[in-house]
Image (cartoon, grey):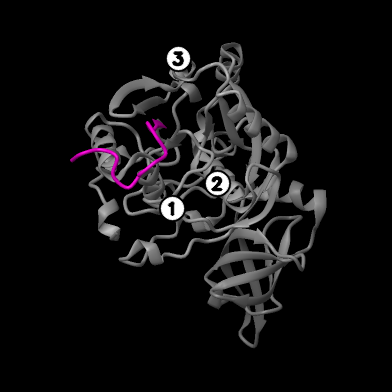
């Protein structure tokens, strides 16, 4: 299975830089077995059944992009350098792993002033990342970060425009609760209060899991044989309540449909490790064609980058030939792609033989 198997031509004009307003007005491609339907996210109530369970990721994106200055005094006087910081994840020693640009402009022990209240000292480096010690902790750190930081927009949006105040709302789900992600679970961005009310009235249940999405979600696949790719690890948790909800939906004949690839990867990690039961830890599960799905009966997700691990995941769910046709339809019909783009509801006919469920 080669990387080129997951490539497709995507016009630059289809890459969304702002979300639909209101959120639930985005378009929704529904792929059910061999049929494709052009809908809107508000039409979810017509495609989901009473007793179905949506699994939602309640991670909260932190404003992880920071801009500051480093001052240095030498025989020639004081010099300053602009420093850009993108937080990646908290470390067990209380420091943060971060991308620091340019890292060569900063020495170990030097301070970067990020705002009136917030500063960070470079404590060390490893694997091209900086380890930063901040001057604040706890609620004080969260408050200062909220003031000084910008949302860490994906590279394909950041290349077109800078993050602004709108993104602090747009790039966050309405149920975000547990801080720690540096990228949003973007399929969930389509949900608003009105849609949630309509789904409840329909008899569709919801449950929450947590997977802190890391910057590694944007890393390109660099190997030609995709089976040799190594996924980045991300921390996640399936609570006892969520496991109970999933088991109950299955027992009562409802479909378990994760919203977003992050929620899907987490519940499939849980099932692989210890069945439908509480789970917590780091997952580096890699889902590509041939993967045996144990929990997910479908998936709501946005449209993904060519040659990405997420393309491999949806191909595993729907079949490679089928997903090619779905994406060809999406491009032809002008669906908007990536984090702020439109959505798809993928409903495979069966969990067996996902390597090639349709004829070309």
SS under mark 3: helix
Q: Nearer the viewer, mark 1 or mark 3?
A: 3
The residue at which mark 3 appears reads as: 46
Image point 36% across, 66% down: which residue? 222
Please state, as top left, top right, bottom left or bottom right, where the C terminus lies in the image: top left
Q: Quadrant of residue 184?
A: top right
Q: Nearer the viewer, mark 1 or mark 2?
A: 2
SS under mark 1: helix
Residue 175 at least partly seen: no
SS under mark 2: helix
- The reply to whether the C-beta atoms of the residues labelled 1 and 3 are less than 8 Å apart is no
Q: Which residues are magenta?
A: 346-360
Q: Relative to residue 161, is residue 200 depicted above or below? A: above
Q: Relative to residue 227, is residue 16 depicted above or below? A: above
Q: Relative to residue 258, is residue 10 depicted above or below? A: below
Q: Which of the two labelled residues, at mark 1 and mark 2, occupies the earlier sequence position? A: 1
Q: Which of the two labelled residues, at mark 1 and mark 3, occupies the earlier sequence position? A: 3
Local packing at callout 2 (Cα closer than 10 Å; few below 14, some 14-19, many 20+) is many
Local packing at callout 3 (Cα closer than 10 Å; few below 14, some 14-19, many 20+) is few
| Dot label at residue 155 | 1
| Dot label at residue 268 | 2
Image point 54% across, 26% down: which residue? 191
């Amino acid at each position: 299975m080669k990387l080129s198997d997951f490539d497709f031509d995507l016009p630059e004009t289809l890459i969304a830089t702002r979300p639909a307003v209101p959120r639930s007005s985005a378009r929704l491609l529904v792929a059910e077995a061999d049929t494709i339907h052009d809908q809107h996210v508000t039409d979810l109530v017509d495609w989901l059944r009473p007793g179905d369970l949506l699994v939602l990721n309640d991670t909260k994106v932190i404003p992880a992009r920071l801009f500051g200055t480093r001052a240095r005094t030498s025989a020639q006087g004081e010099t300053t350098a602009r420093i850009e910081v993108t937080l990646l994840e908290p470390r067990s020693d209380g420091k943060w792993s971060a991308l620091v640009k340019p890292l060569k402009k900063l020495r170990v022990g030097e301070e970067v002033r990020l705002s009136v209240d917030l500063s960070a000292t470079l404590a060390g480096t490893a694997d091209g990342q900086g380890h930063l010690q901040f001057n604040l902790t706890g609620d004080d750190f969260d408050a200062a970060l909220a003031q000084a930081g910008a949302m860490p927009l994906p590279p394909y949006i950041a290349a077109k425009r800078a993050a602004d105040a709108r993104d602090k709302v747009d790039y966050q789900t309405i149920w975000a609760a547990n801080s720690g992600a540096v990228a949003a679970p973007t399929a969930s961005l389509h949900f608003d209060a009105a849609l949630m009310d309509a789904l409840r009235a329909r008899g569709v249940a919801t449950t929450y899991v947590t997977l802190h999405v890391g910057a590694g979600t944007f890393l390109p696949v660099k190997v030609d044989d995709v089976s040799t790719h190594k996924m980045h690890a991300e921390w996640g948790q399936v609570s006892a309540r969520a496991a109970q909800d999933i088991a109950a939906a299955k027992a009562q004949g409802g479909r378990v449909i994760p919203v977003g690839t992050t929620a899907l990867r987490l519940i499939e990690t849980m099932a692989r490790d210890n069945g439908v039961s509480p789970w917590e830890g780091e997952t580096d599960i890699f889902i590509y064609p041939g993967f045996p799905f144990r929990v997910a009966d479908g998936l709501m997700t946005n449209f993904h980058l060519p040659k990405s691990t997420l393309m491999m995941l949806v191909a595993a769910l729907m079949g490679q030939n089928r997903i090619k046709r779905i994406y060809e339809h999406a491009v032809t019909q002008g669906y908007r792609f990536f984090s702020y783009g439109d959505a798809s509801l993928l409903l495979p006919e069966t969990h067996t033989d996902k390597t090639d469920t349709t004829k070309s």
